[in-house]
Image: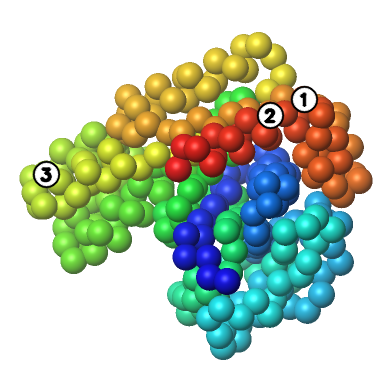
Amino acid sequence: MLFSKKKIITVASGKGGVGKSVIATNIAAGLALLNKKVIIADTDFGGANLHALLNVIPQGEGIKKLVSADIIPGKNGSLQETPIPNLSLIHGWDYLGVHGLNKEQFAKMNTYIEGLEADYVLLDLSPGIANYTLDLFNQSDIGIVVFTPEITSILNALVFIKFTLLKKMIKHAAHNKDVVDLITAAVSPSDPMTITEILDLTKRIDLDIWRFFNGYLKKFHPAVIINRVEEKDDMKVETEFNEYLERNYFIKPHILGWLKESSLIKDSVHKRVPVIIGDPSSDPAGCIKVILHKLLHSF
């Protein structure tokens, strides 16, 4: 059976410790419950943990095989079944010194992912703004950014989204050194530029690239999930985050939903069973179901 309409979903965060992997496993498990064939891959190099969250003992080389061997498109040799029907895992790769992918490894992994037979392939990305993380996010069908209501997490999420935009701009403008130099200089810690300033300066250099940038901003709709909501005031973050992106980045995100801080989620982590499987009638599972509904009907 060919899955010609397979969708790639990336789950990212600007910083670690925001519950990204827990949310990724619950989304994957929820899609599997809907009788979708789902593959989840742990691409958090140096911080792999999906196998623990899904109660799977890693077998073979997992993601390491994908980036260090000759890959045959369409062969699912690195997949492991999970206790959840319809959900398979490509476990992660941890060893002293691993922190990302070079260009050759990135290309090999892309070749493998393109050949996977599934309805959905989820990639749990490394936190932060490593080049390969931004590239995977930008080329996915649905990119999700997870953050919490804490100010540091919010700021890191905004930085992540800004850098995904800049990475896309640099890739498109690669033939024009002046524009590339401009965007590179725009992220200087001592004198960062706003998106507005980048657009204005680009317009003076290359009108065609400026038109592309403007068109891309109108089509770029990153999905957002707010985790660990505790107080009523935390709910305001959703509106404020949305308004900030529209006002400063000229983009409108898809707000998929939020999850309240809950001991049930902590318990599910200890039990190694996603809460949507282990406690499907709970409030956290209900939040995941709302996210799944929006995910299936907004893209």
The N terminus lies in which quarter of the figure? Answer: bottom right
Q: Is residue 228 above or below residue 167?
A: above
**SS under mark 1:** helix
Looking at the image, residue 150 sits to the left or right of residue 299; the answer is right
| Separation (CA) of disc 2 from disc 3 | 43 Å
Give the residue number, with chain letter if any, for mark 2: 287
User: In the rendered structure, which disc, 2 or 3, sits on the residue that comes first in sequence?
Assistant: 3
Residue 181 percent across, percent down from the top left: 24, 56
Q: Disc 2 on helix, strand or loop?
A: helix
Find residue 296 and report its horizontal and vertical position in percent.
Answer: 54, 41
Q: Position of residue 291 (x, y in %)?
A: 61, 34
Report whether 39 appears left or right of 212: right
What amino acid is labelled 3 in the image?
Answer: Lys
The residue sitting at 46% across, 56% down in the picture is 140
Can you see residue 266? no
Contact, mark 1 vs mark 2 (Cβ under 8 Å): yes
Q: At 16% from the left edge and 52% from the top edge, which residue is drawn?
A: 209
Residue 174 lies in what quarter of the image? bottom left
Q: How many marks?
A: 3
Quarter of the image containing the C terminus?
top left
Give the image's coloring scheme.
rainbow
Mark 1, residue position:
283
Which amino acid, by three-letter code, is at mark 2?
A: Cys
State which quadrant residue 118 falls in.
bottom right
Disc 3 target residue:
203
Q: Residues within 10 Å of mark 1 (few under 14, many from 20)?
A: some
Q: Badge 2 local density, few (<14 within 10 Å), some, or many (20+)?
A: some
Secondary structure category for the residue under label 3: helix
Compare residues 153 and 193 and report the one nearer the observer. 153
On screen, residue 120 versus residue 264, left or right, reads: left
